[in-house]
Amino acid sequence: GKYEPGMLYNENGVKGVIFAIKEHKASGTMFCYVMSMDEEDLAWSTEQVDLRYATGTWGAWITADIFDPNRDNRDINNYPAFKWCVEHGDGWFLPSQDELTWMWEGISGGTYDFDSPTVAEFNKTLTENGGEPVVETYYWSSCGLDNTSAIAIAFMKDSVICLESTRDKPYSVRAAYRFAIN
């Protein structure tokens, strides 16, 4: 229909490439997911605080929870990956493990192969519209495991590997945005 993975989305001050259309099972709401035009290599966190988030939790909720002023008075500067995502504007967030897996699935056309023609198509859409290509590397998810590690997803050939890595290690970060379409 109107929104398809691989299409440029440029509405209401939000510019990115659509990577997934997913239904929230509990509400029946369909969401369109958009990835940012750019990416950055950043640490997940520079402090060791126990922040665990369940698989399946939305990245928008995790991102908002990390910066909830009523909770632990966290300094946004101690969470570079999250800070970079929210600086894209209202509604942008660091995608969860599931959302990042959907991103890799959409970019690769479900093949999980970086040599897939759909990867080239996504990268062409990104670069022709002033963005940066997706690279073959690890991307941080918003899912923390304990006070020192978080989950990164491998955007690599034949892979959907989840890497449990120390939060201060820089990995690629690509912001996400979602909106309801029904």
Image: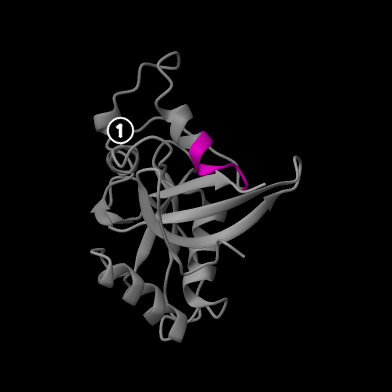
**Res. 50 visible in picture:** no
Count of picture labels: 1
**Res. 2 visible in picture:** yes
**Circle 1 residue:** 47
Q: Tell me where residue 133 appears, x and y as whole percent.
A: 29, 70
**Is 60 inside the magenta-drawn segment?**
yes
Query: Is 179 located above or below residue 110 in the figure?
Result: above
Residue lying furthest top? 70
Q: Residue at x 44, y 86 (%)?
A: 117
Q: Is residue 100 left or right of residue 121?
A: right
Residues in magenta? 56-61
Q: Residue at x 31, y 58 (%)?
A: 37
Please rate how many residues cluster around mark 1, counting C-alpha atoms within 10 Å: few if below 14, some from 14 to 19, many from 20: some
Query: Is 109 located above or below residue 162 in the figure?
Result: below
Query: Is 147 located above or below residue 36 in the figure?
Result: above
Q: Tell me where residue 147 appears, x and y as whole percent.
A: 42, 36
Q: Residue at x 28, y 57 (%)?
A: 39
Q: Tell me where residue 135 appears, x and y as whole percent.
A: 31, 71
Q: Is residue 130 left or right of residue 94?
A: left
Query: Is 48 located above or below residue 96 in the figure?
Result: above
Q: Tell me where residue 70 appears, x and y as whole percent.
A: 44, 13
The quarter holding residue 168 reads top left
Depth check: 133 or 101 in front?
A: 133
In the rendered image, the quadrant that contains the N terminus is bottom right
Depth check: 85 or 5 in front?
A: 5
**Is 73 inside the magenta-drawn segment?**
no
